[in-house]
Amino acid sequence: MLTIKKFTFSLLIIIFAFSVFKSAFAITETGVEITQLQEDSITKNSITLSGEYTFENWGLKYPYGLKFVYGEDPDNLNLETENILTEDITPPFTGVRTFTYTITGLTPNTSYFYNIKDTNTEVLGEYMPVTGSFITEALVIGGTVGDTKVNTGGKDISNVGIQIGNNATTINTGTNCVEEDNNEYCFLAPLPGFSDKIDASFGFGDYVNSLITLAIGIAIVLAILMIVIGGVQYMSTDAFSGKQEGRERITNALIGLVIALGAYTILNTISPNLVNFNVSVKTVSFEADPIDFSEPPVLNADNTYAVAVGQQELDGQIYKTGWAWPNDTPDIRSYLESQGIEVTATKGTDADCDYVGEKGCTSVKFDSSISGLVLDKIETLRAACNCTLVVTGGSEFWLHKTHGPGAKAIDFSVTSGLTEYITGSSSFPSSGSCKWYPLPASDFGGKGCALAEHAACGAAAHWHINFDRDPNKSCQSN
């Protein structure tokens, strides 16, 4: 009698172990395989679908159901049908079965995406992928069936109104993964708990979280295995020591299983963040006042600049600090000199600027849209004053805040003839505040101003002339 009780007890343990084992893996193996799925007809507001399916399971009774999920966004199939069919499968199961279903209530002239899912009642109706199924697009226009499917972005998406081939099981085998950009990576082989590819948003913490889930699954499998071994050991021997070892093996397996599941459950109940190892660094942003590149740069004792001198555009090309500056000698400078207008700079006879940021140079290289106009204005000034003109400042924007390749501004040396033409007196106004004077309207059409700059303005004495200023509006402002 005692032996029968022991046998019954051991048998119950083995049955319990297999039941737990089956339940543990029911979420990853559906057993349903779609072998054919096609569109029979498409109307203005419906799609009729039919297909074939087969079933493979663990050899146990298996309840399941099939339903369609669909929507206008392939990444968000937010609509669903009722169960197409629900059936308890009892092995052995052979052959294939068919189904037909019509999705109604669709909007005309709208593209829909649909997929077929398995509803496993043993895991509380959780949707699970079906082997051989895939997302399919159908434009509801009442048209005819079209071409075969195409692979788009890693998904098998059909052309408009398509009929799927008779061998749908070759689809979604893991070989259709497509890396759409450098931020995506397709796995060489399927990994449990992961999709077929990941992107840059997938971090190290996601791997750790998946490893924890995998570790718990392994712990369950090992615990079940040890329970089975302990049950067999307990049942197969009459020796007291053997039965004691069997009981201890079963007890230890149950304790380990409780510890593994209990620890995870308790931590997750207290706070899900305790079992979430996603390590992320918060983005820190700050605002800074923009640097004003209009001021002349500060020159250090070693002839280097303390701050960057910025950048400007010349003929569509951006020129930054340190970049080579276009040579003006072959065209503009040579022409000015032929008209008796000299271009000088403090660095010597070679006054042209070689690079952005160079000190002591003068450039008369202007944007092609205004270059001819600037030359005409200089020639007009030369003829009107009938005096010597010496250019000391041009388009070198990094040395003068009001100059640039797009500004019609030129600096001239102080000469009695130029001063008399502008002010009516041969004496340069070098005292008091720096003052603006309008250029004679008879020569410049009422446009253009000259500023007498000197020590009070923080500069050496010279005439700063802007040929584009309106004397009636801005000659009295800097």
Image (spheres, rainbow, N blue to C red):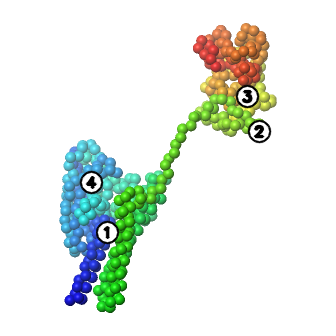
Counting from the top left corner in percent of width and height, residue 438 is at 66, 12
Choose the circle earlier in sequence order: 2 or 4. 4
Outermost residue toward the bottom? 239
Question: Which SS class for mark 4?
Answer: strand
Category of crowding for the residue at label 3, using alpha-carbon neighbours closer than 10 angstroms: few (below 14), some (14–19), many (at least 20): many
Quadrant position of residue 466:
top right
- The residue lying at 80 percent from left, 29 percent from top is 349
Residue at the disc numbered 3:
362
Counting from the top left corner in percent of width and height, residue 145 is at 26, 52
Regarding residue 51, the answer to whether it shows in the image is no
| Residue type, mark 2 in image | Asp
Choose the circle earlier in sequence order: 1 or 4. 1
- CA separation, marks 1 and 3? 81 Å
Residue at the disc numbered 4:
69
- CA separation, marks 2 and 4? 73 Å
Choose the circle earlier in sequence order: 2 or 1. 1
Choose the circle earlier in sequence order: 1 or 3. 1
Compared to residue 456, the image places residue 12 above or below, namely: below
- CA separation, marks 2 and 1? 75 Å
Category of crowding for the residue at label 4, using alpha-carbon neighbours closer than 10 angstroms: few (below 14), some (14–19), many (at least 20): some
Question: Which SS class for mark 3?
Answer: loop
Category of crowding for the residue at label 2, using alpha-carbon neighbours closer than 10 angstroms: few (below 14), some (14–19), many (at least 20): few
Mark 2 or mark 4, whichever is nearer to me: 2
Q: Do tag 1 and tag 4 residues touch (Cβ < 8 Å)?
A: no
Residue at the disc numbered 1:
25
Outermost residue toward the right? 348
Choose the circle earlier in sequence order: 3 or 2. 2
| Residue type, mark 3 in image | Thr
- CA separation, marks 1 and 4? 24 Å
